[in-house]
Image (cartoon, rainbow, N blue to C red):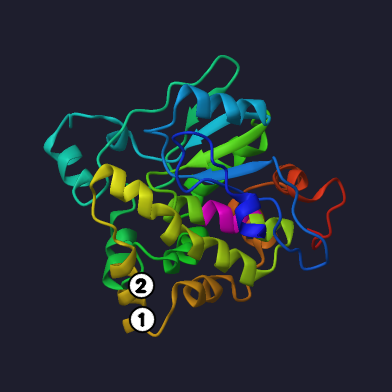
Amino acid sequence: MAHQQRIRNWEGFYNARDLGGLPLRDGGTTRFGAYVRSADLRYATESGLGAAYDEGFRTVLDLRNDFETRLEPRSPDDERANAGRVPPSPEAELPEGMFGVRVPLDDIRASKFWHRMRAEHRAGTPRFFRPVLEETPDRVVAVLRTMATAPGGVVYHCAIGRDRTGLITAVLLSLAGVEPEAIAADYALTASELAPFFARMGFPDHGPHIAERLAELGFTVESAVLEQLDGFDAWDVMRRAGLTDAELERLAAPLIGDYLSHPAS
């Protein structure tokens, strides 16, 4: 029931769910209406976007790279970069009063880093979360800094709303003090929520392959997330990455209110 309350059935949205209703370590649950994670908005209708607006969402944050938004590749590099990804789609056309911004999360310049993530079988799984946050956090900082000053509720998405969106979700929920098991369960929901999206696109669902790959390494999807959250102090990690306490408070407060319990800097 709690999961169903979090799903946002706005017309044309897929894998869209509110970050509200999740259990906090100190008791209570996160607030609704602050953040919604989603797959890209290629099928979002005027009615669906209007429903998001009516619920107080004023910002749509797109985490994709430039080449993922162009229907025709501009170069062989674009074409190679999109190989294996879902087909590109333009940024959503938003109703008046809704603000759209795109801040790519991937640091595509860090080629050695991503080569290592692939060699270690971390890419495409949640096991890349901590390495990104601790080794190449600049793009994450840019995304979170944008969210900290965004007007209204924020809908944020990458292409399918799994990995990049999942990383940002894990940070936001960790800053708010959500129980790690709930963060892992939220990430795992994406597999079933994406099935209709892949079916509508006629694109193969990589979810089962990812689960099989993780199983070969001794993980489930949930345990892979928990591995990344084990000993993870989001406040400390993001401070060291360059975010201020004021920025971190602005990110967490919409989920839990004005009172924040976190380690002093």
Q: Quadrant of residue 220?
A: bottom left
Furthest residue to the right? 259
The magenta stretch spans residue 151: no
Mark 2 Cα shell of 10 Å, populated few (<14), some (14-19), many (≥20) = some
| Number of residues whose C-alpha sits closer than 10 Å to that of mark 1, classed few (under 14), some (14–19) or many (20 or more) | few
Q: Which mark is residue 26?
A: none
Which structural element holds mark 2?
Answer: helix
Give the residue at mark 1: 215
- Front position in the image: 242 or 249: 249
- In the image, taking residue 28 as reference, residue 87 lies left or right, namely left
Residue 171 is a magenta residue? yes
Q: Nearer the viewer, residue 108 or 84?
A: 84
Report the magenta residues as a range.
Answer: 167-172
Which quadrant of the structure image shows residue 136? bottom left
Q: How far apart, in angstroms, are the residues tagged by discs 1 and 2?
A: 6 Å
Q: Is residue 240 visible?
A: no
User: Residue 124's spot in the image, x, y percent?
Assistant: 34, 62
Residue 106, percent across and down?
Answer: 39, 48
Residue 249 in the image: above or below residue 53: below
Assess whether mark 2 and mark 1 are in contact (beta carbons under 8 angstroms): yes
Q: Is residue 222 left or right of residue 2?
A: left
Question: Could you say whether the residue bearing mark 1 is in a helix, strand or loop?
Answer: helix
Question: Is 10 or 239 nearer to us in this picture?
Answer: 10
Amino acid type at circle 2 is Ala
Quarter of the rendering occupied by the N terminus: bottom right
Residue type at mark 1: give it: Ala
Q: What residue is pinned by disc 2?
A: 211
Q: Is residue 46 above or below residue 158?
A: above
Asked whether residue 67 is in view, the answer is: yes
Q: Position of residue 82 (x, y in %)?
A: 22, 44
